[in-house]
């Protein structure tokens, strides 16, 4: 009996370990997406064109696992899905992609990683049941200083325009708002259904852009292997497949444990940008990035519902 119990526990441990490995693999993939985006932009694709093709591929793929339900239960919920499509889809990804074209992908990755902090600040001002601890204030201050250092470093040391960093801040704000509002529907709708709706409304809200600035990238160039590979990677692997695996991973190791791995995304971006884009970071940039990561982590543990 003892041997049987030990065997079951050992099997469960191996199973949990497997999903931790899956989580780390997903983080590595997500950390490389900005690099892949930069490669596509260097080949002539615009930020909005990359977003539309990426989301179109993901939207088509997600239908294979999504509930066939078409609409939300109410007009209010459908309006929330539209808001999610804008903040987590079109506006977020287009601004993030624009930032990638203006500054280093490392800067964008670390600045966008402040989005959980923005979500917390919104929650603090809208919910009375949240107790603010001193560590939240300290963490927020550290993250703000870190962002300031990165922007200063890019402008003064690397001679980059700070515009790209500020656009990355807009992307971070968008995703922070997205994370806040998704909580309103997350407990009433299937996660795959929500994501499919987000993909759909993200695509729909991006299309009016072409009334003012028509599509320019030649469709024939999509057959180029490098371009096709990066688009399939962003749409099918990073958006569709990783999302599906992430949902399974959360059910196996827990949302809190899984979310802690998200802090490793910027580090993965640094690694891939050094390998494929030859973007290196100096000491000042590392200080700013570490302050952001430490600040967001401290703020995360310093904000809780009572």
Image (cartoon, rainbow, N blue to C red):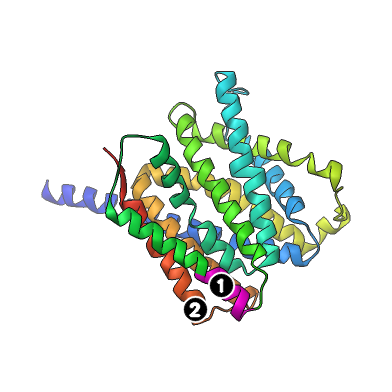
Crowding at mark 2 (Cα within 10 Å: few <14, some 14-19, many 20+): some
Whether residue 259 can be seen here: yes
Work out whether residue 133 or residue 71 is closer to the camera in this orientation and state it.
133
Q: Give the vertical position of 247 relative to 80 (above or below).
A: below
Q: Position of residue 79 (x, y in %)?
A: 60, 27
**Which secondary structure type mostly characterizes the magenta part of the structure?**
helix
Is 78 on the left or on the right of 205, as rendered?
left
Q: Give the vertical position of 98 relative to 250 (above or below).
A: below
Residue at x 62% of width, y 38% of height: 85
User: In which quadrant will I find the N terminus?
Assistant: top left
User: In which quadrant will I find the C terminus?
Assistant: top left
Asked whether residue 157 is drawn in magenta, I would say: yes
Residue at mark 1: 152
> Start and end of the magenta stretch?
149-158
The numbered mark, 2 or 1, whose residue comes first in the sequence reads 1
Check residue 203 in the rendering and tell me which mark sits there, or answer none.
none
Is 304 on the left or on the right of 160, as rendered?
left
Whether residue 64 can be seen here: no
Q: Secondary structure at mark 2?
A: helix
Work out whether residue 140 or residue 247 is closer to the camera in this orientation and state it.
140
Question: What is the distance, in whole Å, between disc 2 and disc 1 at their CAs?
Answer: 9 Å
Q: Are marks 2 and 1 in contact (CB under 8 Å)?
A: yes
Residue at x 85% of width, y 41% of height: 211
Asked whether residue 282 is drawn in magenta, I would say: no
Residue at x 40% of width, y 45% of height: 250
Residue at mark 2: 284
Q: Residue furthest top?
A: 74
Q: Secondary structure at mark 1?
A: helix
Residue 162: quarter of image: bottom right
């Amino acid at each position: 009996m003892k041997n049987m119990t030990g065997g079951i526990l050992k099997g469960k441990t191996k199973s949990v370990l497997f999903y931790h490995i899956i989580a780390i693999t997903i983080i590595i993939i997500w950390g490389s997406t900005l690099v892949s985006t930069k490669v596509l932009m260097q080949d002539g694709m615009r930020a909005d064109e990359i977003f539309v093709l990426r989301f179109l591929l993901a939207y088509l793929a997600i239908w294979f696992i999504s509930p066939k339900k078409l609409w939300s239960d109410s007009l209010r919920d459908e309006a929330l899905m539209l808001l999610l499509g804008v903040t987590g889809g079109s506006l977020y990804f287009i601004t993030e992609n624009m930032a990638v074209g203006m500054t280093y992908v490392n800067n964008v990755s670390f600045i966008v990683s402040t989005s959980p902090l923005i979500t917390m600040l919104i929650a603090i001002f809208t919910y009375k049941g949240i107790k603010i601890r001193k560590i939240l204030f300290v963490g927020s201050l550290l993250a703000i200083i870190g962002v300031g250092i990165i922007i200063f470093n890019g402008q003064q040391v690397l001679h980059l325009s700070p515009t790209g960093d500020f656009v990355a801040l807009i992307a971070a704000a968008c995703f922070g708002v997205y994370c806040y509002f998704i909580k309103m529907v997350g407990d009433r709708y299937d996660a795959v259904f929500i994501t499919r709706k987000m993909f759909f409304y993200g695509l729909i809200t991006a299309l009016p852009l072409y009334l003012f600035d028509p599509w320019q990238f030649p469709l024939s160039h999509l057959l180029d292997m490098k371009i096709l590979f990066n688009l399939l990677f962003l749409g099918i692997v990073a958006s569709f497949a990783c999302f599906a695996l992430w949902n399974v991973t959360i059910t196996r190791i827990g949302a809190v444990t899984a979310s802690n791995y998200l802090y490793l995304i910027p580090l993965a971006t640094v690694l891939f940008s050094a390998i494929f884009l030859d973007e290196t970071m100096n000491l000042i940039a590392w200080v700013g990035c570490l302050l952001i990561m430490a600040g967001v982590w401290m703020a995360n543990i310093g904000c809780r519902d009572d």
